Amino acid sequence: MLEAILILNAVWFIMGFNVFALRGQIFAKLVVPREQRDTPVIDVLIHSGKFLGGFNLAFAVLNVLLLLNLELFDKNQQWALLLLVNAIAHGTQFAFNVPTALANRRGEGVWQVLSGTMLFIFVVDFLMMALNAFLAGRYFF
């Protein structure tokens, strides 16, 4: 199960790197309504996405390196700690979208979390957080 979660983490984070760092216009289109895309702010958003992409790349590389070096971590508490860090990385992406999702339910919010691609991202971040936290708990206790 550990190897499967590390692979899922790496794939998800590399997808984030792709969208945020390499294909910033896709990221911007996800969060900026069509009628507001002709403003200079969209370029700022596209370029700021590269920062998010960098973090996603770092987490993807971490998970690939962990997968390739399983033998370096021989204590359950070590795996629990590493999986907890992954859970927090996914969890913060989920948690910081919760207020926007709640606003969406009232017909408000700066972007739409509860539909389309953003809903997929919202759900997958939650699931990845839960999987990593569950396995961290199994290793810790």
Image (tube, grey):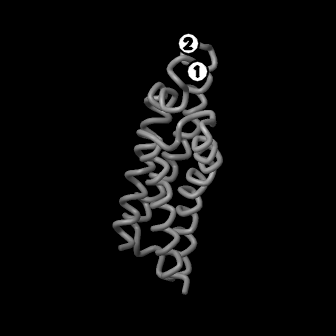
Q: Secondary structure at mark 2?
A: loop
Q: Are marks 1 and 2 in contact (CB under 8 Å)?
A: yes
Which residue is tagged 1?
42
Which image quarter holds the N terminus?
bottom left
Q: Which quadrant of the figure contains the C terminus?
A: bottom right
- The extreme front residue here reads 106
User: Considering depth in this image, is 42 or 119 the residue closer to the camera?
Assistant: 119
Q: Residue at x 38, y 58 (%)?
A: 8
x then y, percent, for residue 112: 53, 37
Q: Which residue is mark 2?
A: 38
The image position of residue 94, as x and y in percent, is 56, 53
Q: Residue 140 falls in which quadrant of the image? A: bottom right
Give amino acid for label 2. Asp
Identified by mark 1, the residue type is: Ile
**Could you say which is closer to the camera, residue 129 or residue 103?**
103
Q: Nearer the viewer, residue 101 or 19?
A: 101
Disc 1 or disc 2, which is closer to the eye? Answer: 2
Furthest residue toward bottom? 141
Which numbered dot is residue 82? Answer: none
Identify the residue at image location x=45%, y=68%.
131
In the image, 51 versus 138, the foreground residue is: 138
Q: Secondary structure at mark 1?
A: helix
Residue 53: give x, y in percent of width and height. Answer: 52, 39
Q: Which x, y percent locates residue 135?
A: 47, 75
